[in-house]
Image (cartoon, rainbow, N blue to C red):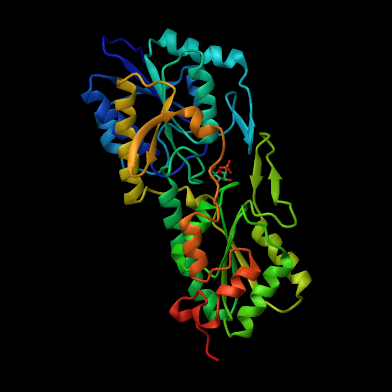
Amino acid sequence: MEITSTQKTIGIVNSGGDCAGINTVIASAVIAGIRMGYQFVGFELGWEGLIDRKYRKLDLEDAGRIQNLGGTVLHTTNRGRFAAKVGQNQTNKIDPEILEACKRSVDELGIDGLLVIGGDGTLSGALQLAETGVNIVGIPKSIDNDLYATEHTFGFATAVEVAVEAIDRIQTTAFSHNRIFFVECMGRNAGWLSLYAGLAAGADAILLPEFPTSLDDIVEFLRYRRDRHRNSTIIVVSEAFEIEGKAVTQGSSVTNEVIFSGISNELIRRLEELAPHEFEMRNVVLGHTQRGGSPCAEDRILSKRFGTRAMEAYDRGLFGHMVALQQGQIHPVPIKDAVDRLKLVTKENNIYEAARRTGIFLGDLQDYLATARPDNMANMPYMISAK
Ligand code: F6P
C-alpha cells in the first residue's frame, strides 16, 4: 500500500507480549484520530514490521470490527531486532543501525509519527527511537501492571478476572478432596496479578516475589490450618517467587529472555521433602490463559480512555510522552518516568493491607499468627471443613 495523502499519517506499533485490550486501544485511537483529520497504518509484528515496512491501512471499518477482540490483529513479538529489555533493570541499547532503519522507514514512508503500545521493554525501545527525533506517544500495556508512572496498565484487569474465575473453580475441587492447591500466576517480578487475584478470590495464602518466605514457614502455615480443621488451602503463587533466593526459570531457545515457569511444581516437590506424606498437594499453572480472550469491561474502558487521550497528546505534540492513569485521570507523562524502574508491591499498599487484614498469609509467619486467629482465618463459607 502506498501512503499518499495530504492527511498526516500515524503508524501504530504494538510490541511485546499480547494482552486483552490492544485491539480496543487501536480502534479507539483510529476512531478518535480520523475525526481529528489523521489517517492510520498499523505495522505488523511489532517493530519488525516497521523495520521491514510491513503495514496495513487501518480505517473506521477495521476499528469497528476489532474493538472488542482479544489479542492484536497486528500480531506481535517479544523478540526480534528491537528488543530493548532483557530482564529486571537490564536495558539493552538498541543497535544504532536498527534505530536508523526505523527512522528511515518513518521518514521514507511519509509517516508523521507513531503511537507505540507496549510494556516496559517496548516503551524503553520507544524512548530510544524518540531520541532520534521520531514523533512518538506511548500507551502502557501489560498484564503485569508493573509500569511505574501509571496506576494501571490495560490488560491487567482482564488477567485478574481470568485468574479469579480459575481460583473460584479450584476452591470447590480443593475443598471436596481436602487438598492444597498452588495456583501459579504470571506477572514476572511484580506480584500485582497474584495479589489482586488472590484477594478477590479469597485465597488462603499469596506468595509474591517481593516478599520471600522460607519453606519451613510455609509448612508451619499449612500445619496451623490443618490443626484447625482447614483441610483445604488455596495458595496463589507468583511465577517469579523465589525459593531460597532462586526463581524457577527456563531459558528460551530462541531469545535470551528469562521465562518464569514451574515454581508451583517445585514448591510441591520441596514441601513434600520437608513434610513427607503430610499434605496432598496439586498445582495449576494459569499461564497464557491470563493473556487470552476479550477484554473485560474495565479494560475496554481503560483502553478507550488511553487510545483517545493518546491521540489528544499526539495532536498537542507531546512526543516522548505516554498516557498514564493517575488519581483516576489520564495524563501525559514522560516515557522516561515509566521505564526507569518497576512498580512493585509494597507493604504500604492498601491492597496488600486488605489481604493481610483479612487473614491471608503473605509470607510473614509471625505477622500471620499474630493476626489470623482461627475465627478470622481467610476462607470461603464452603471452605470450613466438618470437624
Ligand atoms: O509480561 C507479560 C508476561 O505475560 C509475563 O507475565 C510473563 O512472564 C511473560 O509475559 C511470558 O512471556 P511469553 O509470552 O514470552 O512466554
The percent position of residue 155, horizontal first and vertical second, equals: 43, 45
Q: Nearer the viewer, residue 159 or 58?
A: 159
Looking at the image, the residue that sits furthest to the bottom is: 387
The percent position of residue 90, horizontal first and vertical second, equals: 65, 33
Q: Kindly identify the residue that appears in the image at 33 percent across and 44 percent down.
A: 328
Looking at the image, the residue that sits furthest to the left is: 35
Is 65 above or below relative to 289? above
User: Which quarter shows the N terminus?
Assistant: top left
Tell me if 232 is positioned left or right of 163 in this view.
right
Residue 7 in which image quadrant: top left
Q: Taking the image as drawn, is residue 280 in sight? A: no
Q: Kindly identify the residue that appears in the image at 63 percent across and 56 percent down.
A: 211
Q: How many marks?
A: 0
User: Which quarter shows the C terminus?
Assistant: bottom right
Is 262 above or below relative to 123? below
Q: Kindly identify the residue that appears in the image at 36 percent across and 46 percent down.
A: 299
Q: Kindly identify the residue that appears in the image at 56 percent across and 48 percent down.
A: 190
Tell me if 346 is positioned left or right of 329 in this view.
right
The percent position of residue 256, horizontal first and vertical second, equals: 68, 34
Is 189 above or below relative to 387? above
Residue 182 in which image quadrant: bottom right
The percent position of residue 142, horizontal first and vertical second, equals: 48, 42
Q: Taking the image as drawn, is residue 291 in sight? A: yes
Quadrant for ligand 1 reads top right
